[in-house]
Image: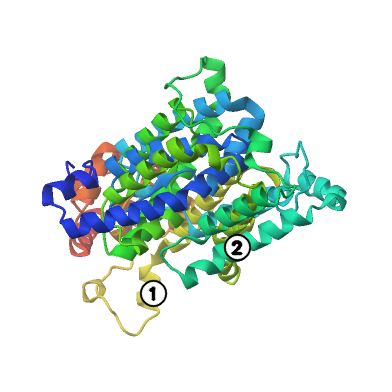
Amino acid sequence: MQKEFTPKLFSLLKQGISKETFFKDLISGIIVGIVALPLAIAFAIASGVSPEKGIITAIIAGIIISAFGGSRVQIGGPTGAFIVIVYGIVQQYGMDGLTIATFMAGFIIIGLGLARLGNLLKFIPYSLIVGFTSGIALIIFSSQINDFFGLHIANLPADFIDKWIVYFNNFHNINWYAISIAATTVIVTIYFQKLIKKIPGSIVAILLATIVVQVFNIPVDTIESNFGEIPSNFNLPSIPHFDYETVKSLIQPAFAIALLGSIESLLSAVVSDSMIGGKHRSNMELIAQGFANIASSIFGGIPATGAIARTATNVKNGGRTPIAGIVHAFILLAIMLLFAPYAKLIPLSCLAGILIVVAYHMSEWRQFKSILKGSSMDIIILLTTFFLTVIFDLVIAIEIGIVLSSFMFMKRMSESVHIKNITSELRNSENLFDEELQNLPSEVILYEINGPLFFGAARQFQETITIDNQDKKVIIIRMRYVPMIDATGFQSLKEIVKTFKERGILVILSGIGIDLRRNFRKNGMYEIIERKYIVSDITKAMSKAEKYLEEQS
């Protein structure tokens, strides 16, 4: 338990970090910090907030997630996944509403970690994750069309379909300078690192675009023209005033931020584990993510989580300890303090090009295509989550996706529970595969349950066993392969025993181990059936049955 809730950095410092590792982390942190700058600005603008809020988030959350998280190489900060949620909250509740929702989400994430639910979040179906991730990618792509084509539309609708209607009505206002800058940015971002691996293509694209626009006075929108100056200092930490009604209205978005942030951070940690052969601490990672979001909100930032792309960049550049993540945050701080006046000159079409590349990488179209060739259940979850994310709302998509996944899981689980009439199989088979069952009396019928007896399978279990057993005197229910029974399963078992008792038929339960016996006691089974008729194996069950039949004859 102590290790589970110990930050990875503390464990590594205790073991000792070599100078060689420290130097590699330092170099990697510098590179990742430079990579993170345009992304932090772009994610903030796409989310409907001012550019510096993305940088503040990357600095504050980046330090906390690396210093106190459960992963060796996780890089924290704003991500594309939050754009949809943040934009919606800002449109409806304003910046104060976003701050309160992020603050609340931080406590929810900490609660998930303390409750040790980190491992459970890994069991969210991949089809659901791909569904909403692909939906988010399409929305990010859609949100950048205005700046990519230089349409200069002042008030874009938040709704996906309405947004595209406005686009089509304004395509006659295309700015060819903006398209040229955006298209060049896409090409440079994708292909430059194939030439020089250590220099991020996005940074090269931003430098080139900004210099060309300023030198030749090209008429395109910039950060300055749309947002003004980028502050080079932090605001004092503060929390907006809120009351019960505010909390009630923001609880749903807060849970959406918490769930999405938790899923993405753990997904990023799992991906990085596979890259370095490590093993992260899920619950400690969640606790750090929670504190990072609380801190980010009170400093005026936006939601943060583990960033898969920046984490992968960290690993590829030699980062192996959380020191790289801390260095990345301080590099961003230095850039904000020293170069903020120059960042305002970045063309918005250049940032649009970078986000188009981000959207492409987020789309996971290969996985999307692969799942469409799979089972019908996975296809339903994938398409439902995808279309709900795009057309309606990410919060609704996640909620319905999880509910739908739960129903699908329960259906599969109930189908995996097998209830066999062993007596019938024995009499219809020439080979008696269980020697102890060769002398099974004709007045006895034997059923075997294979699988968990939970609410999804309880009705099938009850109906199968209670039908057409009027001529028998003893029913043995063999439960050696039942790993667990829930409250509904116990209720069905009680009703079966009561029903047959009223008919004068004895029920014997066989294969009941220590764990099941403990649950039998808690659920009042001993009040329904005598202890002597709850036995550990089939031999004892048959002995009890034979003795009962002798007493009845």
* Labelled disc at residue 379: 2
Tag 1: Cα neighbours inside 10 Å, few (<14), some, or many (≥20)? few
Q: Quadrant of the C terminus?
A: bottom left
Q: Position of residue 320 (x, y in %)?
A: 27, 57
Q: Where, by quadrant of the figure, is residue 291 drawn?
A: top left
Q: Nearer the viewer, residue 353 or 165?
A: 353
As shown in the figure, which amino acid type bears the numbered disc 2? Ile
- Whether residue 118 is visible to the viewer of this picture, yes or no, is yes
- Could you tell me if the residues under marks 1 and 2 are in contact, i.e. CB atoms within 8 Å? no
Q: Secondary structure at mark 1?
A: helix
> Can residue 462 be seen in the rendering of this structure?
no
Q: Residue at x 60, y 52 (%)?
A: 211
Q: Which mark is residue 425?
A: 1
Closer mark to the observer between disc 1 and disc 2: 2
**Residue 256, placed above or below residue 388:** above
Horizontally, is 459 left or right of 269 in the view? right
Amino acid under disc 1: Glu
- 457 left or right of 439 in image: right
Quarter of the picture containing the N terminus is top left
Residue 260 rendering spot, x and y as whole percentages: 49, 44
Residue at image position (43%, 57%) is 465
Secondary structure under tag 2 reads: helix
| Residue under the image location 16 percent in, 56 percent down | 19
How was this image coloured?
A: rainbow
How many neighbours does mark 2 have within 10 angstroms: few (below 14), some (14-19), or many (20 or more)?
A: many
Can you say whether 66 is above or below 483 in the image?
above
In the image, residue 216 sits, relative to residue 154, either above or below, namely: below
Residue found at the far bottom of this picture: 430
> Foreground: 386 or 220?
220
Q: How many marks?
A: 2
